[in-house]
Amino acid sequence: DPAPAPRDVLRFPENFGWGAATSAYQIEGAAKEDGRGESVWDTFSRTPGRTLNGDTGDVAADHYHRWPEDLDLMRDLGLHSYRFSISWPRVQADGTGKPNQRGLDFYRRMVDGLNERGIAPMATLFHWDLPQALQDAGGWENRDTALRFADYADTVFRALGDRIPVWLTVNEPKTVVQNGYLTGHHAPGKQDPDAAYLVAHHLQLAHGLAVQAFRATGEPGRIGPAINLHPCYPADDSPAAAAATRLYDGYENRLYLDPILRGSYPSDVLADLGPDSRLVRGIADGDLAVISAPVDLLAVQYYTPIYVTADGGTERRWPTSVAAWQQIYPDGFYDILTRVTRDYGPIPLTVTENGLPTIDVLAADGTVDDAARVDFLRDHLSAAHRAITAGVPLESYHVWSLLDNFEWEAGYDQRFGIVYVDYPTQRRILKRSAHWYRQVIRDNGV
Ligand code: PNW
């Protein structure tokens, strides 16, 4: 039995869920095994110059082979919930047609292993690894990809729906839009703003169609979207900065929240894009009814705030992590959680990502001292606790990430795990933050 928590612990509600998150391409490896097809991230990471050091997810944390050990580790940490993603090209190599049984079997075994250990599985259907064959047919610019996604989702629901209580549809549509189609830093590496916002629409359509497919199966679980939110603040007191911040917030947050939770696109963003934009022209009759199919919960991911200048640019206000895009600002977590509840009603919330990258060193004595991560998590969990006290119906929290993994274009240098992965040996070593998090779970608080 856990020791009684010290009196100064900020206690979370009874039954609060403590978890950790990963995604398929970032941890699994086994890129060519058991009939897995290729995804846009295989193509992108194997293209010279796209990722740091030319790193790929070919081996990653080798979770595909080491999952029993990884599940034991989760049990040892006391996790209540594990958020992972299902690789579409493992289930349908080309993104369509007859499912690949060996791919489904991998997830069935892993999910059964979680349930046997008393850890609730939370499955994301799409964490950016679009089958390359679908990209070749236009990818998310092609409306048909949303229909293919619904078919894939239906396959997965029928195979695993009886053993997964919580489903997430699309992970961070915004990141696909912005990194995949604006900056080009993520697969498929395009810089095409007009395409980007049509992609946003098709990702949301895919979400809605998957929700409908889920309801049609009659499975008892819950389903929702996973959206990363950026609280936006004006960089100064000018009216121009205030106006620029409102529009910026439209592009960062309301563009993804409003269609799903209100059944409409934010009018300021649509006006800004203009009537000839591919997004505005791409919205068919009935789409918003599909996209706003009722969800059971909203999964929120928070990493950083944004400060918007009068000319619509951005400015840095707080110290960054080793990732230049991340300013460390725990109050932003409070702001975005309370804002979502205030603006969109008391829908159950789960935090499915929040975390800090570090450049860790495995010391000679076999320990990894990631003190910065402990500080980051403590401060963010304190902010979440304040949000709960203010009435936010937050039911669980998942740290990003359980394991060090393939950090997309940043390769393997930036480590988000509470568990260190020694890549040459694939040995797992609990960082200081993992020991700390185990105690948080025992105390049900920070
Ligand atoms: C998320 N931003 O992406 C992803 O869901 C994870 O796969 C990823 O490893 C993790 O965060 C860390 O990067 C993000 O610009 C990408 O604020 C960009 C931002 C936030 C999250």
Image (tube, rainbow, N blue to C red):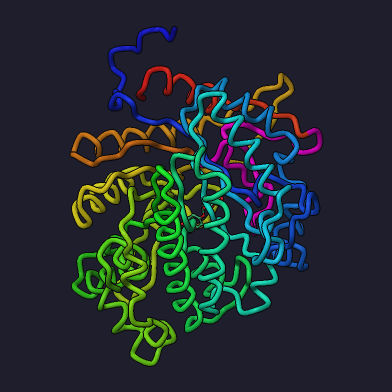
**Which of the 4 image quadrants contains residue 27?**
top right
The quadrant of the picture occupied by the N terminus is top left
Vertical position of residue 154 compared to residue 123: above or below: below
In this rendering, is residue 418 above or below 245? Answer: above
Q: Would you place residue 417 above or below residue 439 in this image?
A: below
User: Where is residue 122 shown, x and y percent of the image?
Assistant: 49, 41
Side of 413 relative to 254 (left or right): right
Looking at the magenta stretch, what is its main secondary structure?
Answer: loop
Q: Is residue 420 magenta?
A: yes
Residue 98 appears in which quarter of the rendering? Answer: bottom right
Magenta stretch containing residue 312, yes or no?
A: no
Q: Is residue 346 at all visible to an observer of this figure? A: yes
Farthest residue to the bottom: give it. 276
Q: Is residue 216 left or right of residue 21?
A: left
Give residue 294's position: percent from left, percent from top.
Answer: 30, 57
Q: Residue at x 52, y 50 (%)?
A: 157
Residue at horizontal 31 percent and vertical 66 percent from the top: 254
Describe residue 198's horizontal placement relative to residue 274 as left or right: right
Q: Which residues are magenta?
A: 400-425
Question: How many tags in the picture?
Answer: 0
Tell me what residue is drawn at x 54 percent, y 76 percent: 144
- Residue depicted at x 36% and y 8%: 4
Image coordinates for residue 433, horizontal then vertical, percent:
53, 28
Q: Position of residue 326 (x, y in %)?
A: 47, 53
Give the quadrant of the C terminus: top left
On the question of residue 227 being in view, the answer is no
